[in-house]
Image (cartoon, helix red, strand yellow):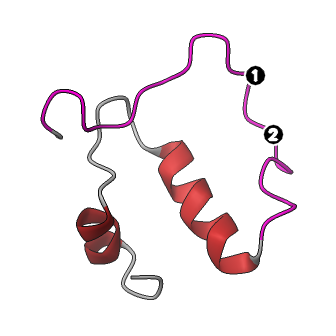
Amino acid sequence: MAKAGYGKRDAPDQAPRRADDFAGLETREAAIAGYIDRLPEGAAIGYKVLAEELPDYG
């Protein structure tokens, strides 16, 4: 988990997920955005963590 203030936070008024949420993005960016979107509240999302978790996109 991330230190306080540095993790993913849910937006209370965010619309439910849809299959086409990231359709306007390039393939790489859509994959990263989708990964981050599925993370739980408070998960670390710094670039080093993402590069470690997504080596193809790091």
| Residue 9 position (above or below residue 39) | above
User: What amino acid is labelled 2 in the image?
Assistant: Arg
Which residue is drawn at the image coordinates 23% and 29% (left, top)?
5
Q: Quadrant of the C terminus?
A: bottom left
State if disc 2 and disc 1 touch (CB < 8 Å).
yes
Report whether 20 appears left or right of 49.
right
Q: Quadrant of the N terminus?
A: top left
Q: Which residue is mark 2?
A: 18
User: What amino acid is labelled 1 in the image?
Assistant: Ala
The percent position of residue 48, horizontal first and vertical second, equals 24, 69
Cα separation, mark 1 vs mark 2, equals: 9 Å
Q: What secondary structure is the stretch in magenta mostly built from?
A: loop
| Residue 39 position (above or below residue 26) | above
As rendered, which of 19 and 15 lies closer to the eye? Answer: 15
Under circle 1, the secondary element is loop
| Residue 30 position (above or below residue 2) | below
The percent position of residue 41, horizontal first and vertical second, equals 37, 29
Report whether 31 appears left or right of 35.
right
Q: Which residue is mark 1?
A: 15
Circle 1 Cα neighbour tier, 10 Å, few/some/many (<14 / 14–19 / ≥20): few
Which mark, residue 30?
Answer: none
In this view, the residue farthest toward the bottom is 56
Q: What are the residue bounds of the magenta stretch?
A: 3-25
Which residue is drawn at the image coordinates 32% and 71% (left, top)?
53
The percent position of residue 6, horizontal first and vertical second, equals 25, 38
Residue 5 is inside the magenta segment: yes
Q: Which of the 4 image quadrants contains residue 51? A: bottom left
Report whether 2 appears left or right of 39.
left
